[in-house]
Image (tube, rainbow, N blue to C red):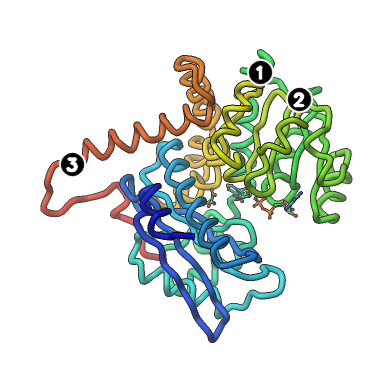
Amino acid sequence: MNIFSYMENYDYEQLVFCQDANSGLKAIIAIHDTTLGPALGGTRMWTYASESEAIEDALRLARGMTYKAAGAGLNLGGGKAVIIGNPRTDKNPEMFRAFGRYIQGLNGRYITAEDVGTTVADMDLIHLETDYVTGVSPAFGSSGNPSPVTAYGVYRGMKAAAKEAFGTDDLSGKTIAVQGVGNVAYNLCRHLHEEGAHLIVTDINKDNVQRAIDDFGAKAVDPGDIYSQTCDIFSPCALGAIINDETIPQLTARVVAGAANNQLKEDRHGDILQERGIVYAPDYIINAGGLINVADELEGYNRDRAMKKVETIYGNIQAVIEISNRDGIPTYKAADRMCEERIARVQRSRSTFLRDGKHALSRIHHK
Ligand SMILES: NC(=O)C1=CN([C@@H]2O[C@H](COP(=O)(O)OP(=O)(O)OC[C@H]3O[C@@H](n4cnc5c(N)ncnc54)[C@H](O)[C@@H]3O)[C@@H](O)[C@H]2O)C=CC1
Ligand SMILES: CC(C)CC(=O)C(=O)O
């Protein structure tokens, strides 16, 4: 991978490598764009096959966060971190403390939170070394685990996409195939079950599958069979790049709406979904609930205010669909356009010289 060409291509600001032999920490922090504010994005811990795979993941996810914050109307930029390692076997407290010190060294340019492989307990350890961490335990006045809030936002966004496809946002009686029933999707399934939807689930973790069967009467299928299930909605809630040349021909759903980041393997797969008449709810618009929730901490966490903001995801999905229909472009392009226009507008409105510029989040509280 030619790192500088990649960064130049998508206009990345900064890539930080963090190493601590004492704890075994090997981490990468990617900051994509801070036009709107400090870069906020979770830390993923994963067993990457190579260092370039880890770098590419951090970069791709960071760029997604720029768009996610812009689309959600937040005054935040895009960043993400990855820790190379197995989250089940390679963690130790010193690793997260060391990582916290590297974050502190960025002096607020990057703020972290949970992602796949990291937990509230990990954020508490990071918090021992830096204030630039969210999703910390509620005991510290923070918002805790963002997953249930992300799930609620996905549920609301799914309803908005269903309205476009089926003429109603009522999900009762609809069959929904869910890929991955981890932290976010378990909570999503709860909302869907309560509304009377039929659930088909898969996961590589058998315990997670069993929990969905026991709690929601879900039907379970093997991971490779989830794409071809007869269903109304396909909900990717595991990892990225699962909308691709192999999976699209298998889909029977009229809506794709899920929590996973970077669902389209390549942009052209969003074009193919559109050609097939499948309503795609762009990932970074529909899964912004967790970000909205942790971002609220920066102003002193208020759950009611955060949940009100999460409700806007329904309208944001509708706005994207409206642009898509108006301009005759796929929804992923409509979402990009909407977010890029907001960033450009804010950049223009803040272009005049100020001796001591102030940002909406310059009051970030030091706990
Ligand atoms: N947790 C949050 O608040 C947010 C999460 N996301 C994204 O949503 C997705 C899910 O996140 P979480 O629920 O937090 O993660 P998680 O790790 O709790 O759940 C993911 C689940 O997918 C399963 N899985 C992995 N590979 C699979 C495969 N090939 N087939 C079937 N199942 C597979 C895992 O076993 C796990 O149960 C991730 O892509 C994450 O980046 C996005 C926004 C916020
Ligand atoms: C809680 C969020 C900040 C997690 C994240 O990084 C994301 O939305 O992908």
Judge from the rendering whether residue 251 lies leftward or rightward of residue 328; answer left or right: right
Viewer-proximal residue, 141 or 74?
A: 74
Judge from the rendering whether residue 360 lies leftward or rightward of residue 229; answer left or right: left
Judge from the rendering whether residue 198 lies leftward or rightward of residue 7; answer left or right: right
Secondary structure at numbered mark 1: helix
Q: Which amino acid does label 1 sit on?
A: Ala
Q: Residue 165 carries which label?
A: 1
> Looking at the image, can residue 141 be seen?
no
Q: Are marks 3 and 2 in contact (CB under 8 Å)?
A: no
Q: Which amino acid does label 3 sit on?
A: Ser
Secondary structure at numbered mark 2: loop
Q: Quadrant of residue 162?
A: top right
Circle 3 sits on which residue? 351
- Residue 116 is situated, as x and y percent measured from the top left of the image, at 63, 57
- Residue 107 is situated, as x and y percent measured from the top left of the image, at 33, 66
Q: In which quarter of the image is residue 191?
A: top right
> Image quadrant for the C terminus?
bottom left
Image point (67%, 47%), residue name = 184
User: Neighbour class for label 2 at 10 Å: few (<14), some, many (≥20)?
Assistant: many
- From what the image shows, is residue 61 above or below residue 323? below
Viewer-proximal residue, 311 or 305?
A: 311
Viewer-proximal residue, 179 or 354?
A: 179
- From what the image shows, is residue 342 above or below residue 33? above
Pick whichever of labels 1 and 2 is earlier in the sequence.
Answer: 1
> Looking at the image, can residue 361 be seen?
yes
Image point (53%, 74%), residue name = 26
Q: What residue type is labelled 2?
A: Asp
